[in-house]
Image: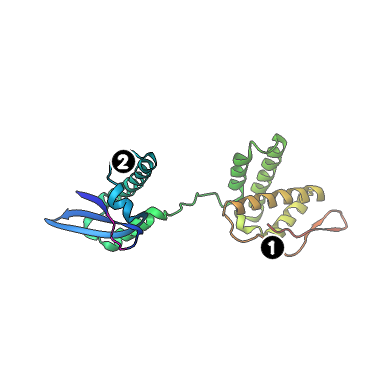
Amino acid sequence: MASINFLYRSTKDEASLTLRLLYRYNGEDYVLGVRTKEKVSKTYWNKQHNSKTRDASIQNKIATIKKDLSKLSKYVIDKFENTNPEIISKNWLTRIVDLYYNPKVVKKEYPLNMISFIDLYIDKRRNEVTKSSIVKFNVIKHKMERLEKYIGREVYIADINEEFKTDFEDFYNEHNYSQNTMHRELGIIKTFCKYAKSLGIVENPVKVNHPFRFKVSSVNEVVKIDSFVV
């Protein structure tokens, strides 16, 4: 069984409270202390915190601070009860209190391959885009599925680079898609990549340094499409 209390251990007029963890293990009593970020004045702690004042502003202050201390206490006790007592130490307590104030951010897991990401994009933007746009997104998705079979591997968001440019060009030329279709759908793929970047899936801009080149006639006429940077 463990308990928590707080102490004002400073000669300054205002300071952060010290949290003390008290527990008993294998017949021995332990007391561990660590500084918190709960800052109060010495006057408040010594004269007001446990008082029965009728001053509404002080009552509100007391309620707020007690609520904050209670939340911190519960957090530490919960961690204590789920930890092997053998590894409890001052360093452990310091780390737990630090995690309370600076919790680890758990990143959402998003699909990294383009086909699954298109499904995510449609789901996330369903209420923001037109039905015709969703149809276009699905058309591109099905083309990406065929492209993957064509090149024999999955296409990941991070793969939108020079190698993808070549595969994209070859696939669209072989299937005789028009220049306008290729240009339009490339722009939509760029939009997917921008959205992936906004979610933190890709950290660096996706860049194709050279223009995309598409054959648009039987005499191998070439039309250049601007490089795209996400």
Highlighted range, magenta: 7-11
Quarter location, residue 169: bottom right
- In this rendered view, identify the residue nearer to me: 110 or 91: 91
In the figure, is residue 60 to the left or right of 88? right
Quarter location, residue 163: bottom right
Question: In x, y percent, where is residue 135?
Answer: 70, 38
Q: Which label is found at residue 53?
A: 2
Q: Residues within 10 Å of mark 2 (few under 14, many from 20)?
A: few
Q: Are marks 2 and 1 in contact (CB under 8 Å)?
A: no
In the figure, is residue 50 to the left or right of 127? left
Q: Which label is found at residue 44?
A: none
Residue type highlighted by circle 1: Glu
Report helix, strand or loop for mark 1.
Answer: helix
Q: Residues within 10 Å of mark 1 (few under 14, many from 20)?
A: some
Question: In x, y percent, where is residue 92?
Answer: 29, 60
Return the residue at label 1. Answer: 162
Q: Residue furthest left?
A: 27
Report helix, strand or loop for mark 2.
Answer: loop
Question: In x, y percent, where is residue 17?
Answer: 32, 56
Question: In x, y percent, where is residue 129?
Answer: 68, 38
In the figure, is residue 2 to the left or right of 215? left
The number of callouts visible is 2
In the figure, is residue 72 to the left or right of 120? left
Quarter of the rendering occupied by the C terminus: bottom right
- In this rendered view, identify the residue nearer to me: 73 or 46: 46
- Residue at 81%, 51% in the rendered image: 179
Q: Report if residue 10 lies within the magenta region.
A: yes
Residue type highlighted by circle 2: Thr
